[in-house]
Image (spheres, rainbow, N blue to C red):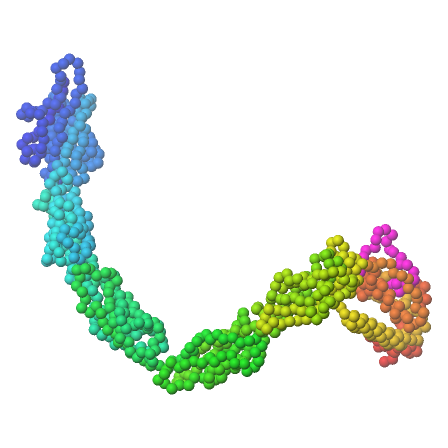
Amino acid sequence: MGSVLLFALGLLAQSLGFSWAVPEPEPSTLYLWRQAPAPGRVRRAWVIPPISVSENHKRLPYPLVQIKSDKQQLGSVIYSIQGPGVDEEPRNVFSIDKFTGRVYLNATLDREKTDRFRLRAFALDLGGSTLEEPTDLEIVVVDQNDNRPVFLQDVFRGHILEGAIPGTFVTRAEATDADDPETDNAALRFSILEQGSPEFFSIDEHTGEIRTVQVGLDREVVAVYNLTLQVADMSGDGLTATASAIISIDDINDNAPEFTKDEFFMEAAEAVSGVDVGRLEVEDRDLPGSPNWVARFTILEGDPDGQFKIYTDPKTNEGVLAVVKPLDYESCEQYELRVSVQNEAPLQAAAPRARRGQTRVSVWVQDTNEAPVFPENPLRTSIAEGAPPGTSVATFSARDPDTQQLQRISYSKDYDPEDWLQVDGATGRIQTQRVLSPASPFLKDGWYRAIILALDNAMPPSTATGTLSIEILEVNDHAPALASPPSGSLCSEPDQGPGLLLGATDEDLPPHGAPFHFQLNPRVPDLGRNWSLSQINVSHARLRLRHQVSEGLHRLSLLLQDSGEPPQQREQTLNVTVCRCGTDGTCLPGAAALRAGGMGVSLGALVIVLASTVVLLVLILLAALRTRFRRQPRDKSLLYGLQDDLRDNILNYDEQGGGEEDQDAYDISQLRHPVEPRATSRSLGRPPLRRDAPFSYGPQPHRALPTSPSDIANFISDGLETADSDPSVPPYDTALIYDYEGDGSVAGTLSSILSSLGDEDQDYDYLRDWGPRFARLADMYGHQ
């Protein structure tokens, strides 16, 4: 059985630092394949321990190992290797002498890229046949300290409150090393190279945590610390790297604010508010803009009425004194304020107290001309409705706050929409100058509003505005009256019907209206014996019969009284018709006349109505007769001298069309033969009707022919009206064409008008009396 010889160049390997353990070989040759003594074949294998080689080797090519098979003589075996570093990436790192089996390193190794290579070794005869089974050849790259440690950040940042105790964690520095972490090449140690004096911070050499080591951190002294950090491998003795640590000291409120002065002096104008008076300067060493720096001011004394306030300017941290209520020079000429200042955040207990935590502020008030003041504004008063002109309303006077200045006040109206009031300019006394209408649109819920002005005589003058609200008191000046018409009907039997319901109204407003009191007039004793009134509610009563009375109209005298002060009473007559009633309590039909006669219309009123009607009819008759007599002379002159009957000779020519309804010719038979019935052009069905004809049109009676020329005009007018009312023909005023001139006419022809013979013998001036249309003919054929 064959074997592979692993031949190590011992002396060379030791000189280059190889570490390589093998079974104790013979002096120069190691046989790894060897035939087993037992009969039968067994699987051959190469048993080669890992070969170690250092990275960054400079002497190349470098022999690593020699492999050998004992199945053939030297020179008759072909050796080869495959795998990463040979024929796979990274290529050509390793090579083998195919005849001797020596393996060489041909390139510099980097453990940080590849820490080991696994190759496959082959042994073939010269014919290319396999002599041995392929086996693995593992090459391990030994680490060297060729990488410096690296900080994860160039700058590490941390924050800590000022005044922190020792051992307080600030931040942590972190670093890495690319070398083998199992060796000292990656054993890192941290340190602080520089931090200034005094040394407030320390760093843990193993973890990189930075902590405080002593007290005394004060942001107002040093706000930021810059530390220089170092990390080294080989447990602090190897390669190094540096970084920075910036530690910011966070502020706490360990400094109280202080005023810059012990006393401030300011001036303020009187009678104004919402204005700034002055500024209070303060100092604070804490961080600007933080709650430890922002100042808050408090007025401790000198402002009992709350006329001042102090707010903080967010940019300068100054206190701004402002007037929030108007000052009065006459009441107080100077204010002495005591003011304190604190921070928005509470002060640390260990912080020293401020020397100027309080100050005095003197405010001098400047005297100005103030506007007059109405002591009572608005002023409310009342006056009875209907008050006559000159009635005193109120005295709306003002006082001048400027007591040290002698000034005169005058009064005037600014708003009086009804011009109802009169104001005394010197005293402010107000009185009415006319009666105010209760229906005025400026009365709102019984109140009238006016605006009065008070003006002083200073330079410049000041004006005050006062509102005068006047309540118009309701006066009981109207008596109640029956709400419905003062009439009704009752059944003659007292136990029949519901009775007569009476209601009352009053033009006065409460409390001068309801409840109303209904009473039968005590001055008429018979009323109380025959009738009764019972109150239903505050505004209604019911009238009933006590016993049966005669049927017919009864006039009852009632007394109606309201609840006003003093009460108003009205006597009113109620017309009641007593009638026979059926079982349902209503008057029987035979009693309708009696009920109608009792509707409250007196005999005198009936006589007046009838007389007026008769006079109106007489006037209409006289007007009609007058019109008739005026038309007859004109009609006679219109046709005077005509000997022929012209009714068949009035024709129309040149039709221009009459629209959709004008489909038939004008039926002149009404003029030609009025006594004969019209011949219909349709034998079947109903003739079409005009849409504008009255629906009540029917057969018209025959009309007699005129007996005299004076009746012809009326005959023509009536005929036209009849034709216009006929729904089967177009209106008479529609333009139509007529080609029928008639035959056998009993009237004479007008053809003489067209003849030139005898024109000089014709006199056409009489045509002017027929109207404007015939006047045109007179102009055409009359004397020129």
Left or right: where does residue 433 sit relative to residue 88?
Answer: right
Residue at left offset 18%, top offset 68%: 355
> Which quadrant holds residue 581?
bottom right
11 shown above or below 188: above
Between 623 and 606, the one nearer to me in the picture: 606
Dominant secondary structure, magenta: loop
Q: Is residue 112 left or right of residue 24?
A: right
Where does residue 642 sit, x and y in percent of width and height? 93, 73
Residue at the top extreme of this rendering: 39
Residue drawn at x 20%, y 36% is: 91
Please check the rendered image and state whether residue 75 is part of the magenta-colored stretch, yes or no: no
Taking the image as drawn, is residue 638 in sight?
Answer: no
Q: Which quarter of the image is occupied by the C terminus?
A: bottom right
Count of numbered badges drawn on the protein: 0
- Residue 615 position within the rendered picture, expressed as x and y whole percent measured from the top left: 82, 74
Question: In the image, is 145 to the left or to the right of 422?
Answer: left
Report the side of 310 relative to 743 (left or right): left
Q: Position of residue 215 (x, y in %)?
A: 13, 56
642 in relation to 460, above or below: above
Q: Say which of 493 and 118 sits in front.
A: 493
What residue is at 24 percent from the left and 75 percent from the top? 264
The quarter holding residue 732 reads bottom right
- Quadrant including the N terminus: top left
Task: Please tell me in which quadrant of the rendered image residue 575 appears.
Answer: bottom right
The span shown in magenta is 668-695
**Is residue 302 visible from the viewing direction of this image?**
yes
Percent position of residue 96, x then y: 15, 30
- On whether residue 683 falls in the magenta region, the answer is yes
Q: Residue at x 63, y 66 (%)?
A: 517
